[in-house]
Image (cartoon, rainbow, N blue to C red):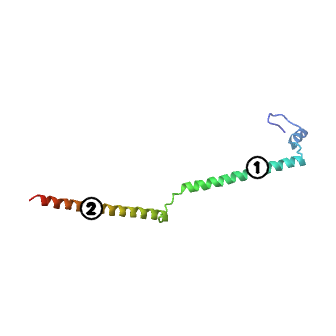
Amino acid sequence: MSSESGQRLSMEELKRRNLPQPTPSQSCPSCEEWAQLLTALSTAQEQFDALNQELAALQAQLKQAGKRKERSISPPSLETAMSVMVWLALLLLGTMVGMVVLQVIWSGLAALWSAVRLLIP
């Protein structure tokens, strides 16, 4: 048999080259290492849950921001109705006082006209 460079290798050399490579030995973690790994895992799980809650809140905000604001028409409150009624009553009272003042002025002018007519022959 020949290799890439054209050399002939013996059968033993070929077998040796084709043997599976030994894998580095892996040792199982100790109880202390398991405890550390579980602590790290629970911390990561808590962080994941917190991030998941924040993500849900952000998604809810985005969904609400994408919606148009709904316009609602509600009947006026009792305070509004009472304040309108008070202002209308004040306006009516002011109108009535104004009419009385105009009546007094009109009658005064009528009395003055009567006196002037008597003085002019």
Q: With respect to residue 13, does 84 lie above or below?
A: below
Residue drawn at x 45%, y 62% as measured from the top left: 83
Residue with the mark numbered 1: 44
Question: Of label 2 and label 1, which has the lower sequence position?
Answer: 1
**Residue 86 drawn at (x, y percent):** 42, 63
In this rendering, would 61 be left or right of 95?
A: right
Residue 108 visible from this viewpoint = yes
**Residue 18 drawn at (x, y percent):** 86, 42
Q: Quadrant of residue 95?
A: bottom left
In this rendering, would 54 be left or right of 21?
A: left
Q: With respect to residue 67, does 75 lie above or below?
A: below
Check residue 104 in the rendering and tell me which mark sits there, or answer none.
Answer: 2
Sort mark 1 into few (<14), some (14-19) or many (20+) by Cα contacts within 10 Å. Answer: few
Work out whether residue 89 or residue 10 is closer to the camera in this orientation and state it: 89
Q: Amino acid at mark 1?
A: Ala
Label 2 residue SS: helix
**Residue 71 drawn at (x, y percent):** 49, 60
Work out whether residue 31 or residue 24 is closer to the camera in this orientation and state it: 31
In this rendering, would 38 be left or right of 65?
A: right
Sort mark 2 into few (<14), some (14-19) or many (20+) by Cα contacts within 10 Å. Answer: few
Residue 77 visible from this viewpoint = no
